[in-house]
Amino acid sequence: MGYNQENYRRIRETYETKYLKAREEAEARREEVYLSIPEVRAADRELNGLGLEIMKAALSGKPEAAMQALREKNTAIREARGELLKAHGYPADYTEIRYECPLCADSGFIDCKMCTCMKKQLIEAGYESSGMADLLRSQSFDNFSLDYYAEDPSAHRRMEQITAVMKQYAENFDPATSGSLVLFGGTGLGKTHLSTAVARVVLDQGCDVFYTGAVNMLSDFEYQRFGNSITGDAGQDTSRYFTCDLLIIDDLGTEVANQFTTSVLYNLINTRLNRKKPTIISSNLSQADFRKRYWDRITSRVLGEYTVLPFLGMDIRSQKLQEKR
């Protein structure tokens, strides 16, 4: 399990930058104050010397009474320093370092554990790099309604079961042990919505999720293989299709089927299975049409090793349009 490595590298660099920036800005404010209030510089020198004195006293085992006297002197100087600043129109903490996150001091870590602020940024970056940022903002398990299946009791029962299976899959997701899913059914039955809902939960757990339409995915592989003959571009990097924690391929069956695309699809499916990398595939095809369209080597792996979830019901998009009329 791991965040997208490119996102991690980029965000780690931003933390290093803002940590240094916060300290540099504090130093600039301190120099500004020193120029206008020389007494503050003198107070800081005294505080630095007192800090060393306190450290030496602690190491030499001086009596608690002596230690307390030094601490009280330190407090008195700090309070007087603050009053000096306020008397000249500055806040008492004007020269303090102002970190964006006071918990981790903009380092991203607390006692070698990632701070919540950095986790939040990585999750947000994961949403953007998942390929489904817009879908993630509007689709979740919470707003997936089974009411659109109510007219057909058998469809309602089936979709209730499928929703429960996919929710459990998402909540218990482990990139090392979770299996793969294939969703069959006509357009507008909720396949993309539930796939997005799974992605949302898995991303929030800190995993790397990549969503793609079948047509775009195979275009990437074609571009990687042949490049651009006009510009001479070397082609597309397709490594993430093989390395991400969860790959979601939408609308399989809408792509042009030929020797190249079928070979690419087989290699991707087979490689991810061998590496035990979970995949979710959705298709508007029926299982029978899926068998007719693809090689036996593909259908045997998908139908034999993926959990098959056949969606039922009426087109939700059409129902929503009817509601608006």
Image: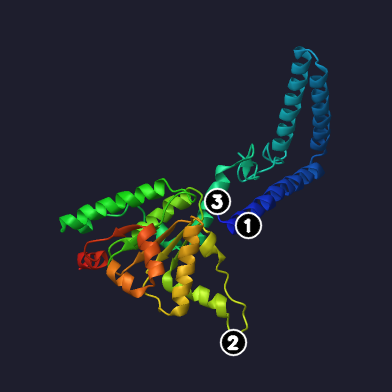
Q: Mark 3 packing: few (<14 Cα in 10 Å), some, or many (20+)?
A: few
Q: Please say if 275 is above or below 65.
A: below
For this rendering, which residue is in front, 32 or 21?
Answer: 21
Residue highlighted by disc 2: 230
Mark 3 residue element? loop
Q: Residue 10's image quarter?
A: bottom right
Mark 2 residue element? loop
For this rendering, which residue is in front, 163 or 258?
Answer: 258
For this rendering, which residue is in front, 51 or 203?
Answer: 203
| Marker disc for residue 135 | none
| Marker disc for residue 10 | 1
Which of the two discs, 2 and 1, labels the residue nearer the N terminus?
A: 1
Mark 1 residue element? helix
Dot 1 amino acid type: Arg
Residue highlighted by disc 3: 2
Q: Does residue 170 show up?
A: yes
Which of the two discs, 1 and 3, labels the residue nearer the N terminus?
A: 3
Dot 3 amino acid type: Gly
- Front: mark 1 or 3: 3
Dot 2 amino acid type: Ile
Q: Position of residue 126 (x, y in %)?
A: 51, 56
Q: Mark 2 packing: few (<14 Cα in 10 Å), some, or many (20+)?
A: few
Which of the two discs, 2 and 3, labels the residue nearer the N terminus?
A: 3
